[in-house]
Structures are given as C-alpha cells and as structure tokens.
Image (cartoon, grey):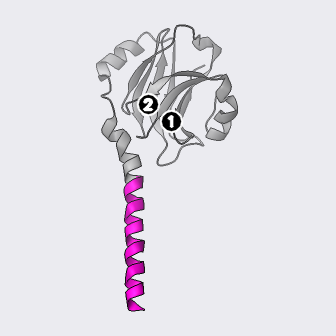
Amino acid sequence: MRRTLIILAGITTHALFLAAGFVLGVYMLPILTERPSPSAATLEAIAENALYAADITEDLRGNDFLHWGEGTISLTQTQIVHEGELAPGPDYVLYLVPQFVEHEDDFLPLKGESQVIGPVNSFEGFALDIPGDVDIDDYTTVLIWCEAFSEFIAAAQYR
C-alpha cells in the first residue's frame, strides 16, 4: 500500500511540474522571440503626422492580468503606431474594427467586417504599415487580438 502511494505521489508531482512547465513555456516563448521595438524617437516622429490618436486603457471588460494594453495609438495615412506596453503573448494581430469593442464576445461577430493590418511582434511599442487599399475612415477602432487563443488584448476608439 505504501509503495502504491509513493508511486501515485510521484506521478502526481511529475504531472503538476509538466503542466506548470507547459504553461510557463506558453507565456515565455513570445517574450523570448519578441522583435525589438522601434525606438521611442522613431515612434514619436511617426505619431507627429497622426490624423487620429486614441488612448488604450487597462480598464476594459476584456482585460485581465494576462490580457491588457496601455498607451497611445496614432494613425497616419500609411501607418499605425503604438506607444506604450502590451501584455506579452503569442500571435497578436492588429485589426481595424467598424465599431468600438471591449471584449472578445463583442469582437467575434464583427471579425468578418474587420480589417487585418498585420502581426504585432513587440510588446513595448510598434509601427505597422496600413495596406494601400485600406481607408482608416471606414473604421472607428484599433484592436489588438490574440489569434492563437481568441483573446481580446486591447482596443482604442480613434473616431
């Protein structure tokens, strides 16, 4: 009986450590593979030509301790710039959305009407080119979305 308990305890502890290692790996991989953010001066220079700007806050319904963003989003005719910070995570994508959303439940019905701008590969500011056939005046909101887990990260209504 004692031997069985020792074996069960060993299996349980190994399974717990394996699960913890997997979760830690999912969290750490985006941090380890993050591309360098553009310099603050570069982001500021691009943002100076902004047609629109909006603040990202951490108090939206879709935010929690793992899914958040803060800072400023600026839109020029050709680029979208984020000056601030995002929670690290995998497979982030920037969208333009036709109306303000603050949770994945709000975004999923609008995802087909939304415009993909590109992948977000840095968590301390980024600049993404807007495709030439996209008119930012057709949308109202910038949204950062985790494709891998269908999770809302951040949004800002710019008009």
Residue shown at 41%/67% (left/top)? 15
The reply to whether dot 2 and dot 1 touch (C-beta < 8 Å) is no
Mark 2: few/some/many CA within 10 Å (<14, 14-19, 20+): some
Which of the two residues, 130 or 50, is positioned nearer the viewer here?
Answer: 130
Which of the two residues, 22 or 62, is positioned nearer the viewer here?
Answer: 22
Residue shown at 37%/64% (left/top)? 17
**Label 2 secondary element:** strand
Q: Amino acid at mark 2?
A: Gly
**Label 1 secondary element:** loop
Please state, as top left, top right, bottom left or bottom right, where the N terminus lies in the image.
bottom left
Give how far apart the Cα atoms at labels 2 and 1 are: 7 Å
Q: Provide the residue designation for mark 1.
A: 57
**Quadrant of residue 99 within the rendered picture:** top right
Position of residue 153 relative to residue 72, above or below, is below
**Quadrant of residue 116 within the rendered picture:** top right
Residue shown at 37%/83% (left/top)? 6
Q: Amino acid at mark 1?
A: Thr
Which residue ends up furthest to the right in the rendered image?
109
Q: Main secondary structure of the magenta part?
A: helix
- x, y percent for residue 128: 43, 19
Q: Is residue 117 magenta?
A: no
Does residue 25 appear anywhere in the picture?
A: yes
Give, as a single range, the part of the protein colored magenta: 1-23
Q: Provide the residue designation for mark 2.
A: 71
Q: Is residue 62 left or right of residue 128?
A: right
Q: Is residue 8 magenta?
A: yes
Q: Earlier in the sequence, mark 2 or mark 1?
A: 1
- x, y percent for residue 117: 52, 20
Which of the two residues, 57 or 11, is positioned nearer the viewer here?
Answer: 11
Q: Which mark is residue 32?
A: none
